[in-house]
Image (spheres, rainbow, N blue to C red):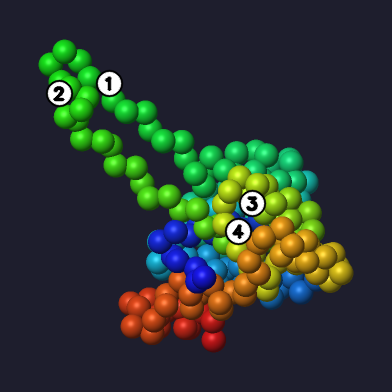
Amino acid sequence: MLLDESESQLVLVDYQERLMPVIFEGAMVLENARRLAKIAQFIDVPVWGTEQNPSRLGGNDAELRALCRNTLSKMHFSAAEEGLCEWLRPPAKPQQGGNARSLPKHLQKPQQQAPERNTIVIAGCEAHVCLLQTALDLLEDEFDVWVVTDACSSRTERNRDAAFDRLAGAGAELVTTEMVAFEWLRTCEHPDFKDMLTLVK
């Protein structure tokens, strides 16, 4: 099964200014997160961010934050506990009721709902805390979760790797930044292929 850009959303977890300097391979991880966000913007994949206790850990990397549609400030480690799922799967709008002069309900056209984007491509820090708990909650809420391993990390390599083992066991797909990019585009004839290629080279 390949990623489909029309069914995807990107969630970037806690790339915060006071956290990133102590993250294992932090500079590479942050650069891959920026690449993901830029590629997502090229092809209209929604990008969401989260920040853990920003008054203590600072805001997300400014460039990354600017690429997100919205950023959720949270105190729970799992962003799903603080409303992320409502952003990813907004509630259906209620049908408009008719009045005496409107068409009978069986003749009214049903309202078109936006297509559901149930595939969540997720990356972030720390992999064994906020990323892990958010991803597990998304799986429990019946999202398809794809974890971008080279855009995730923790303060230690061991904690990062333990998170990947647990996520794979729970049913998340483990991928890399380039896997996501090439699966979203599918063909070198895609109009955004050259722009994407400059980002991954």
- Nearest the camera: 45 or 155? 45
Q: Which mark is residue 139?
A: 3
> Sequence-wise, which precedes: disc 4 or disc 3?
3
Q: What residue type is disc 3 on?
A: Leu
Contact (Cβ within 8 Å) of mark 4 with mark 3: yes
- Nearest the camera: 23 or 43? 43
Query: Looking at the rendering, which quadrant does residue 85 occupy?
Result: top right
In the structure shown, which secondary structural element does the residue marked by tag 4 occupy?
strand
Mark 2 neighbour class, 10 Å CA radius: few under 14, some 14 to 19, many 20 or more: few
Residue 100 place in picture, x, y as percent: 16, 13
Q: What residue type is disc 1 on?
A: Gly
Q: Residue at left 46%, top 53%? A: 117
Q: Which residue is mark 4?
A: 145
How many angstroms separate mark 4 from mark 1 (CA)?
Answer: 37 Å
> Sequence-wise, which precedes: disc 3 or disc 2?
2
Mark 4 neighbour class, 10 Å CA radius: few under 14, some 14 to 19, many 20 or more: many
Mark 3 neighbour class, 10 Å CA radius: few under 14, some 14 to 19, many 20 or more: some
Q: Which residue is mark 2?
A: 103
State whether residue 167 appears in this view.
Answer: yes
Quadrant location of the C terminus in the rendered image: bottom right
Contact (Cβ within 8 Å) of mark 3 with mark 2: no
Q: What residue type is disc 2 on?
A: Leu
Contact (Cβ within 8 Å) of mark 1 with mark 2: no
Q: Which mark is residue 97?
A: 1
In the structure shown, which secondary structural element does the residue marked by tag 3 occupy?
helix
In the structure shown, which secondary structural element does the residue marked by tag 1 occupy?
loop
On the rendered structure, is 194 left or right of 100?
right
